[in-house]
Amino acid sequence: VVEVKFEVAMKLSGISTTDIDITSLDSIVTLLEDVIQDMLPEGAKAKLLKVGGFSLTRRMLQEDSSLGVDVEFEVIFTEPCSEETCDDSKETLLKEADDFSSDIVAKIEDGTLS
């Protein structure tokens, strides 16, 4: 199996860190997970790491006074392979990762990430 992992960071405009508290975090996380999952190719996974300064593994708040809400997540693409096809599988995954990254950047820039 070939695996490609990379982290993605983005800023959501139209919302600030002061709009997020521990009680609203779950609904925001659920929404982001659904949106990100819809963008992933079949078999890929994403794990949200931070939203607006909240670490999603420890739920710790870190102050950030900038406009917008920072979101960090990890994307994992996997592809089964045999010894003969691992190089091809790795190239395919790298291409899918690049396509995903370009797609999410375009959607953030044009406001269609929803």
Image: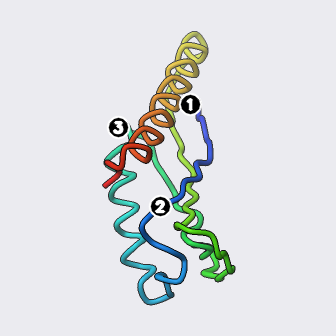
What crowding class fits label 2: few (fewer than 14 Cα within 10 Å), some (14-19), or many (20 or more)?
Answer: some
Color encoding of the figure: rainbow
The disc, 3 or 2, on the residue closer to the chain's N-terminal end is 2
Label 1, label 2: how many angstroms apart (C-alpha)? Answer: 34 Å
Left or right: 59 with respect to 15?
A: right
Q: Position of residue 40 (x, y in %)?
A: 39, 42
Front one among 105 and 87: 105
What crowding class fits label 1: few (fewer than 14 Cα within 10 Å), some (14-19), or many (20 or more)?
Answer: few
Front one among 12 and 78: 12
2 relative to 59, above or below: above
Residue 42 has which mark?
3
Q: Name the amino acid, label 2.
A: Leu
Residue 1 has which mark?
1
**Which is in the foreground here, disc 1 or disc 3?**
3
Label 2 element class: strand
The structure residue drawn at horizontal position 46% and vertical position 29%, both measured from the top left corner, is: 99
Label 3 element class: loop
Q: Residue beneath label 2, please? A: 12
24 relative to 107, above or below: below
The structure residue drawn at horizontal position 35% and vertical position 37%, both measured from the top left corner, is: 42
Q: Position of residue 63 (x, y in %)?
A: 68, 80
Whether residues under marks 1 and 2 lie with C-beta atoms below 8 angstroms apart, the answer is no
**Which is in the foreground here, disc 3 or disc 2?**
2
Q: Name the amino acid, label 3.
A: Glu
Label 1 element class: loop
Residue 10 has which mark?
none
Q: Name the amino acid, label 1.
A: Val
Q: Position of residue 86 (x, y in %)?
A: 58, 18
Quadrant, the N terminus = top right
Q: Residue furthest top?
A: 84
The disc, 1 or 3, on the residue closer to the chain's N-terminal end is 1
